[in-house]
Amino acid sequence: MNNRRAFLKRSAIAALALYVPSFPASIGSARITPNFPLKSRKINSTMITCYSQTGNTARHGKLMAKVLETRGVKVTSAELKDVDIDGINTHQLLIVGSPVFYYDTPKYVKRWMAGLPKINGMAVAS
């Protein structure tokens, strides 16, 4: 009969054996090449927008805005519903924050992103 300690050791060894073959693939040695070149390498203007139900995502958006402002970047931040979609192209970086519902982005955020104009060359983050 096995005790708990022996079971945990065997489980750890089995998990390591399953993980090690995929380890070299997870290093990420390949370079990501963009489909469109960035408009500018220096970010001077940023739009931070978020969809938040409990206020946690909005708090993180405000924190990012303050950090960027201390680094000399002009930041415009607003809730997702209050953003003028036509004016997004005037910024060089777009940051969209949203909660995750059951390992997926909320439908409201997906619809908003589908309605965006072409933002070729703009840096984005989520």
Image: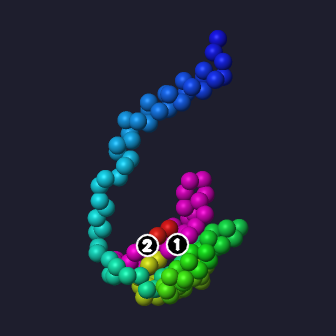
Disc 2: which residue: 124
Q: Does residue 111 show up?
A: no
Q: Is residue 108 magenta?
A: yes
- On the image, the x and y values in percent for residue 83 come to 55, 83
- Residue at 37% over, 82% down: 42
Q: Element at badge 2?
A: strand
- Residue at the extreme top: 1
- On the image, the x and y values in percent for residue 17 come to 44, 30
**Front residue of 11 and 96:** 11
What's drawn in magenta, residue-wise? 95-123
Q: Does residue 110 show up?
A: yes
Q: Is residue 99 magenta?
A: yes
Contact (Cβ within 8 Å) of mark 2 with mark 1: yes
Q: Report the label total.
A: 2
Question: Is residue 15 left or right of 29 when viewed as pictured?
Answer: right
Colour theme: rainbow
For label 2, the crowd category at 10 Å Cα-Cα, with few meaning under 14, some 14 to 19 and many 20 or more, is: few
Image: 124 above or below 25: below
Give the mark nearest the N terminus, 2 or 1: 1
- Residue at the extreme right: 54
Q: Element at badge 1?
A: strand
Disc 1: which residue: 96
Residue 90's quadrant in the figure? bottom left
Check residue 78 in the rendering and tell me which mark sits there, or answer none.
none
- On the image, the x and y values in percent for residue 72 come to 49, 86
Image: 78 above or below 56: below
- Residue at 44% over, 36% down: 19
Quadrant the N terminus occupies: top right
For label 1, the crowd category at 10 Å Cα-Cα, with few meaning under 14, some 14 to 19 and many 20 or more, is: many
